[in-house]
Amino acid sequence: MIDRLHGHEPPDELESLLLAAGNYVRPSDDLRPRVLELARTERQERRMQRNLARMAAAVFLMVMVISAYRQPANAAASQLFSPAMEAVSLEAEASARRHDPSWETVESFTDIRRWQASLLRL
């Protein structure tokens, strides 16, 4: 038999200590119901978190799909991206190229902003 291995007690003594401790430790009468209730509560919380994550993913996907296929809500919004807007922008760029950067460039961009603001008010 092994007397002591690296400071540990022999297996027979350890087993007898464990068996003896079993007589001293008594679980309470409500231990099992408490453990079962705690397990049910944890399971319900995990299920709710999983369902909430699924709903959030579904809402996110719906918002992405709707925003991808959404058309401009009114005519003023669609005019902001019209060929007329592109013409005004090209005119401002041409003016900036013809002259040195000066107040004319600032004025042309200010005119563009006013024109956009007037469209948005409609």
Image (tube, rainbow, N blue to C red):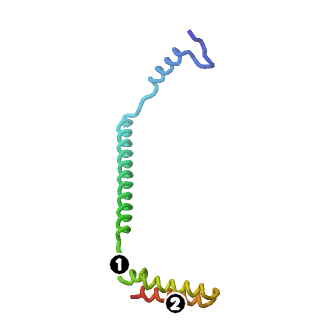
Q: Which residue is mark 1?
A: 73
The amino acid sitting under disc 1 is Ala
Q: Residue at x 38, y 64 (%)?
A: 64
Which image quadrant: the C terminus? bottom left
Residue 59 lies, in percent from the top left, at 36, 61
Sequence-first disc among 1 and 2: 1
Residue 13 position, x and y percent, is 53, 16
Q: Is residue 5 above or below residue 86?
A: above
The image quarter containing residue 66 is bottom left
| Pointer 2 residue | 111
Residue 41: x and y in percent read: 37, 46
Kind of residue sitting beneath label 2: Asp
Give the vertical position of 68 relative to 37 (above or below): below
Quote the CA–CA distance across marks 1 and 2: 25 Å
Question: On screen, 120 above or below 71?
Answer: below
Q: Badge 2: few (under 14), some or many (20 or more) residues near its Cα, within 10 Å?
A: some
Tell which tag, 1 or 2, sits nearer the viewer: 2
